[in-house]
Image: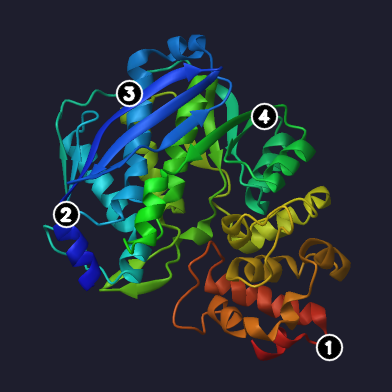
């Protein structure tokens, strides 16, 4: 707590000063300009591949800049979190009073885990103030998007695979969107045989990494919110009228209570945020663009059962964030030691044969004694729910009981002790 107060005093204002975009070698390159006053600047970069000047002209300069400006707003938490400045000054574009309240809600509710892990008390009225240089924000227009075209953000995990396959079965006109694609994601899309893929690359400013090394604050941000805004720009550029995410109803359950409020690692995947985003999109981005989650009515258990019907993806998919973070995905798709790996293992176990489980994970995670505490946290027997995208306690308990029943008399270690 002492550290964050010192940093707030040292850096009292975070400024979103502007953005720049240009077509370079058939790619749309976008730069955002942030400043942590008094003397630290950031210039993150976003590249949308295979974009021509004609695509920009088709949606119009005003609509394009509105979409880009809002991506910059969604990028703010990744840099603001370094010092948790009490003021955010937006000079890059206009925000109405309604928009300011919208963004403040996202920043506060979407960064609950960050506040908890850094011992930050956000409850005071003066904790965060957002100011805009201009307030006459224009409303959304129609961009001429095609309602029958569905863009699916793909992460290479089972959820987005289920969305893709279900929409294929419904004979929808599909395209995939990937941001900083990993090998597993590329392999999954290739196996899906979906022809159109929109690819983007997001680069973190190295200055942020250096600040973290010096002891500045770090933590979880509402990344899915950023992904929604980037996906919206891509949908607009390539004529997709719908963006189909794969956020399930399980996301509604929080991880713990902190200072009297629920902290939810998956806040930007919840129905609450999805509805907030839909209203924001219709009013400020594009009237003919619809972003929604295809899996909203399904839980982790139901999605695992649906995924079990698509064996061609078993050796290809990956949901382990630990492997992704350390850049080891080329060597293994699953670390086999985190709550995400164990959760996916738990939910697939009732539906797959032992041979299939071994082909996916390479080992029996239920025999790993060192995962007992993690297993109990998944079942609601720990101090908190793991800070990962995992099923609800109720769903995990159901998968646990079915796994025990399937294993029979020779129960593996975790099923005995859980």
Instruction: From the viewer's side, name the closer residue of 28 and 40.
Output: 40
Query: Is the Cβ of the residue at disc 1 closer than 8 Å to that at disc 4?
Result: no
Closer to us: mark 4 or mark 3? 3
Q: CA distance from mark 1 to mark 3?
A: 61 Å
| C-beta proximity under 8 Å, tags 1 and 2 | no
Pinpoint residue 380: horizontal percent, then vertical percent: 51, 80
The numbered mark, 1 or 3, whose residue comes first in the sequence reads 3
For label 3, the SS is: loop
Judging by the rendered image, the residue that carries numbered circle 2 is 86
Q: In the drawing, does residue 145 fall left or right of residue 43?
A: right
Image quarter of residue 363: bottom right
Name the secondary structure under disc 1: loop
Dot placed on the residue nearer the N-terminal end, 2 or 3: 2
Mark closer to the chain start, 1 or 2: 2
Up-down relation of residue 149 to residue 152 (above or below): above
**Label 4, label 3: how far apart the Cα atoms are:** 26 Å
**In-image side of 172 versus 264 (left or right):** right
Quadrant the N terminus occupies: bottom left
Query: In the rendering, at what x and y percent does residue 208 appear?
Result: 37, 50
Q: Which residue is mark 4?
A: 172
Dot 3 corresponds to which residue?
140
Q: Measure how far apart labels 1 and 2 are at the Cα level.
A: 57 Å
Marker disc for residue 410: 1
* Whole-number angstrom distance, CA of label 2 to CA of label 3: 30 Å
Tell me what residue is drawn at x 32 percent, y 44 percent: 76
- Label 2: which secondary element: loop
- Of badges 2 and 3, nearer the viewer stands 2
């Amino acid at each position: 707590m002492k550290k964050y107060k010192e940093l707030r005093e040292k850096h009292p204002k975070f400024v979103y000063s502007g953005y720049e975009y240009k077509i370079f070698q058939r790619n749309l390159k976008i730069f955002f300009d942030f400043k942590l006053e008094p003397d630290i600047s950031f210039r993150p970069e976003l590249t949308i591949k295979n974009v021509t000047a004609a695509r920009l002209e088709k949606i119009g300069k005003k609509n394009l800049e509105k979409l880009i400006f809002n991506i910059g707003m969604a990028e703010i938490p990744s840099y603001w979190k370094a010092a948790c400045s009490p003021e955010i000054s937006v000079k890059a574009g206009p925000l109405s009073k309604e928009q300011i309240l919208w963004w403040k809600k996202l920043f506060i509710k979407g960064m609950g885990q960050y506040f908890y892990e850094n011992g930050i008390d956000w409850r005071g009225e003066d904790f965060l103030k957002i100011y805009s240089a201009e307030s006459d924000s224009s409303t959304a227009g129609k961009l001429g998007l095609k309602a029958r075209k569905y863009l699916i953000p793909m992460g290479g995990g089972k959820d987005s695979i289920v969305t893709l396959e279900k929409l294929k079965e419904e004979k929808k006109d599909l395209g995939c969107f990937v941001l900083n694609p990993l090998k597993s994601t590329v392999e999954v899309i290739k196996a899906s045989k979906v022809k159109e893929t929109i690819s983007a690359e997001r680069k973190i400013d190295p200055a942020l990494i250096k600040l973290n090394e010096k002891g500045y604050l770090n933590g979880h941000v509402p990344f899915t919110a950023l992904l929604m805004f980037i996906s919206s720009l891509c949908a607009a550029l390539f004529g997709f009228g719908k963006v189909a995410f794969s956020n399930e109803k399980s996301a509604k359950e929080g991880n713990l209570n902190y200072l009297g409020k629920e902290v939810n690692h998956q806040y930007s995947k919840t129905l609450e945020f999805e509805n907030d985003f839909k209203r924001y999109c219709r009013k400020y981005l594009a009237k003919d663009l619809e972003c929604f989650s295809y899996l909203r009515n399904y839980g982790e258990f139901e999605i695992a059962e649906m995924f079990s019907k698509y064996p061609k993806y078993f050796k290809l998919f990956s949901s382990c964030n630990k492997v992704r973070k350390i850049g080891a995905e080329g060597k293994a798709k699953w670390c086999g030691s985190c709550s995400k790996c164990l959760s996916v293992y738990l939910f697939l176990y009732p539906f797959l044969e032992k041979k299939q489980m071994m082909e996916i994970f390479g080992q029996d995670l239920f025999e790993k004694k060192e995962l007992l505490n993690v297993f109990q946290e998944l079942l609601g027997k720990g101090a908190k729910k793991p800070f990962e995208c995992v099923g609800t306690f109720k769903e995990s308990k159901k998968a646990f009981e079915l796994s025990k029943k399937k294993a029979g008399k020779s129960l593996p270690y975790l099923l005995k002790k859980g």
